[in-house]
Structure formats: C-alpha cells, structure tokens
Amino acid sequence: MSYPLYTSHAYLWPLLSPLEAYESEMAQWCALLEEHGTRPVRRMLDLGSGGGHHLYHLANALPDLQEGIACDLSSEMLEVLKGLLPGFETLTADMTSLRLERRFDLVTVHDSFCYLSRIEQVRALFEVIREHLEPGGLSLVKLEARAEDFAGPYRYLTTFEDEQRELTLTHYEWDPEPDDGWLEVVYLFLERAGGRLNTREERHRLGLFPGPEILQQAETCGLTGSFHPVERWDEERENLLLMLRRGED
C-alpha cells in the first residue's frame, strides 16, 4: 500500500526525519557488524530505503564499501535519497519480490520492515534476503516492535520547522485487535506555509508479530536469526535489531 507521506508528500521527509537523527543508531549498527561480521562489506543492498537518511550514515561508515544498491517502492523517496548518496544505484521495486541475481556482503532493512502486515510477507522478505546474501553474509533488520513487547497506545506530538514551513505532527499508535498480527498508526499533520494552514490525516497499517514466529520464518528460509537491543529512542519502548546470517554453502 502506498501512503501520501512517502509519495505526494515525500518533500516533507527531510523536515520530519532529520538526517542527524540517525547518526547514533547507525554507529550501533556498525558496532554490531564489527563484532559479528566475518567478511569486509564491499557490496551492500538496502531494502525499503525510503529517503536514505539511515543509509547515508551507514554507507559512509563502511570503509571497504565499493558498491551499494537502494530499493524502495516509492520513486519520490528515492529522489530524496539520490541527493544524499549519488553513488548508489537505486531501484523502484518491491522488497518482498526482488530478484537481482547478484549477491552482497550485507543486506539491510530499516523502518520498512514494520510495513509488512502479514507473516507471509515476512517470509517472502527473508527469502529475498537469503537469495541476495553471500554465504556467511549478514543482514540487519530493524524491528519497531514484537507482539510480546507492545504496550501501546503510544502518543507523540512534535513540531518541526524550517524557512518554508512549520509542521506539527500528532502520532497515535495502537493495536485495535490484539493477536491479529497488525497495529495502526494514525498521523495528523498541520502544515503552515505561505500564510495558510493545511490539515490532513493518514492511517498506516503495520505488522506486529511474535519474536519466535519471526525467527522461525528466518530459519525456514535458511537464515540464523538473533535479536539485539539497541539504543531506545523512547524510554517506554524496546528498540531491537534482528541479525540474520546466511550459512556457508
């Protein structure tokens, strides 16, 4: 499903999600790669790349990186990414069905994992990851929440501004029907620019799966998985990274 935030309103992304906000998180990803990796990262594939703010910090911290590909459903978001990472190849494609017939030392998935709202999509993504990993290669996948950890509803109110506009965002995250595998995030936007105030609402459907079920799907696809806690962006919530390794052939 396509949401206006990532298509017609992608121009808001640099304001809503500042580049510098990802630097600390990506330093933690690099530390995990250094601790658990067994090969230099010369080629990487990023799935569901969005505007690429996370990828900017990660790619620039990998000293051996020679080739990078960023994939996303939204061509508008990839245009934002190209301004940050002109050396990256970009592909407008579905990360759950991608087949490049190429392999990489590292495959990463940032916030886009949460938009998989069915367990079949999770398995399809893991198949894509295995297909594109070199033997012994690693994948890092960010999880917004596991079903057993979710304790919402969560509420956030934030205002962002630059020279062109002021944007106030209300974020309400809840699980309408527990144990059905998904949750909902309601965004309310108040955008003031050029002497006018515009308001709109978006409702995003996100996946919410038990940790053991996620690991089982990974194992079924030939990947060994483990969860690693990383720095929390909200003290109320666990922040987890799923590490997947493809075995040696």
Image (cartoon, rainbow, N blue to C red):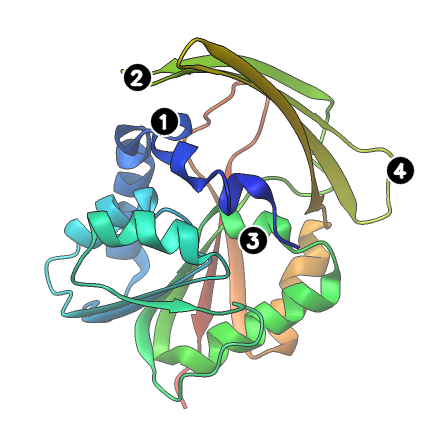
Q: Position of residue 109 (x, y in %)?
A: 45, 56
Using the rendered image of the protein, determine whether residue 49 is visible from the camera's viewpoint. Answer: no
How far is mark 3 from mark 1, CA to CA? 22 Å
How far is mark 3 from mark 4, CA to CA? 20 Å
Q: Which residue is mark 2?
A: 162
- Check disc 3 and give the amino acid type: Phe
Residue 177 versus residue 82: which sits nearer the camera? 82
How far is mark 4 from mark 1, CA to CA? 33 Å
Kindly give the residue lying farthest to the left in the view shown.
Answer: 63
| Residue depicted at 38% across the width and 17% down the height | 165
How far is mark 2 from mark 3, CA to CA? 29 Å
Badge 3 vs badge 1, beta-carbon distance below 8 Å: no
Kindly give the residue lying farthest to the front in the view shown.
Answer: 195
Kindly give the residue lying farthest to the top in the view shown.
Answer: 195
Badge 2 vs badge 3, beta-carbon distance below 8 Å: no
- Check disc 1 and give the amino acid type: Leu
Badge 3 vs badge 4, beta-carbon distance below 8 Å: no
- Check disc 4 and give the amino acid type: Glu
Secondary structure, mark 2, is loop
Q: Position of residue 132 (x, y in %)?
A: 41, 79
Residue 211 vertical position relative to residue 105 in the rendered view, above or below: above
Using the rendered image of the protein, determine whether residue 26 is visible from the camera's viewpoint. Answer: yes
Q: Mark 1 packing: few (<14 Cα in 10 Å), some, or many (20+)?
A: some
- Check disc 2 and give the amino acid type: Asp
Q: Which residue is mark 4?
A: 177
Q: Mark 4 packing: few (<14 Cα in 10 Å), some, or many (20+)?
A: few
Residue 81 vertical position relative to residue 16 in the rendered view, above or below: below
